[in-house]
Image: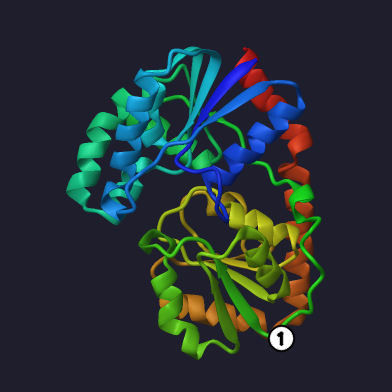
Amino acid sequence: MKILFISPTYSGAGGIGPHAFRLSKKLSEEGHEIELMNIPHLPIKKLKNLSFSFFGTLKAITNNRKYDAVHAWNLPSAFIMKHIKAKKKILSIHGIYSEQVAMLHSKLTGSIVTSKESQVLDWADILTTDSKYVQSEYKKKLGKNFQYIPAPLDPKRFINIPDVKKIEKQVVYVGRNSFEKGVDILKKIDSKIDGDVKYCTSLPWPEAMKILKASQVFVLPSRVESVPQSILEAFFLKIPVIATNVGGIPELVTNNKTGILVKPNDPEDLLDKINYLLNDDELRKTIANNAYDFVLKNFSWEFLLGKYIELYES
């Protein structure tokens, strides 16, 4: 099949970009012809999505190629997908877009986006998400039916991550340096933590994974979230996770089993849980082993690639 991918990025430490890129590689290995549409954007936070959609739409309008399917990731990509000539149009959503906009901009802007969101989603023949929470929320708020397909973890990516010496009481954050990720909450308390905190916000993925692998605890203090790939990476590397009880995180983190959940926007609760876990060797070991088993059982490419192929061929 001839399939066009549209994503704001195909790189980064986590999120939709790396997932779209890995899926394109897996599909190519299966004999499908995959084209990645690369679209520029203005390096200004409030204009990033708008400029991406604008430049992408211009590119789509002048693209006369025909595809068996076009697969777009996140709402800004839908404006581009709309103008592509394809037998089937698929839109994958990572998080509640209007919720993210309200968090980053204003409740008014979020309300405006919500009013248009339903119309934009209707441009797709098939809607998918990697989160049961997102699936449920869109059904409840807009009456939209999303197919749930988890974003797999590829163990082969970790082959070249070298063995590293564990650093006693090292805590790590891996992800964007943005408000919705709650990095500021962790920074408020990092001087009170019984150890050192490493912030991997702009490192290349292999470097971030080396630091994660050397750490004793991974922390994700998000205010809004879908199903973070960074948690799956920590699970695979057997690094115990502490994360906020928001969005799709509880789909991964079962409290005191595969990780520890904390209340969002609560620095004191976060501090207590970090210091508690840093000082309990047995609990860290138990959580790490449980999480490793969980990710291998539920997020393998061998199981999930077939679901994507069914999506394109159905």
Residue type at mark 1 is Glu
Q: Residue at x 66, y 54 (%)?
A: 232
Task: State the image coordinates of residue 236 (x, y, percent, origin top left).
Answer: 74, 57
Task: State the image coordinates of residue 258 (x, y, percent, origin top left).
Answer: 68, 60
Mark 1, residues whose alpha carbon is within 10 Å: few (<14), some, or many (≥20)?
A: few
Figure coloring: rainbow
172 relative position to 280: left or right: left
Q: Residue at x 25, y 45 (%)?
A: 110
Displayed quadrant of residue 54: top left
- Numbered-mark total: 1
Task: State the image coordinates of residue 101 (x, y, percent, origin top left).
Answer: 30, 48
Looking at the picture, does residue 276 appear above or below residue 102?
below
* Mark 1 secondary-structure assignment: loop
Q: Residue at x 74, y 37 (%)?
A: 301
Residue 137 or 74: which is nearer the viewer?
Answer: 74
Task: State the image coordinates of residue 275 (x, y, percent, origin top left).
Answer: 59, 84
Q: Residue at x 78, y 72 (%)?
A: 285
Looking at the picture, does residue 145 appear above or below residue 76?
above
In the picture, the quarter occupied by the C terminus is top right
146 relative position to 295: left or right: left
Looking at the picture, does residue 19 appear above or below residue 29?
below
122 relative position to 90: left or right: left
Looking at the picture, does residue 190 appear above or below residue 106?
below
Residue 268 or 49: which is nearer the viewer?
Answer: 49
Q: Is residue 143 visible?
A: no
Q: Is residue 130 visible?
A: yes
Displayed quadrant of residue 26: top right
In the picture, the quarter occupied by the N terminus is top right
What residue is pinned by disc 1?
168
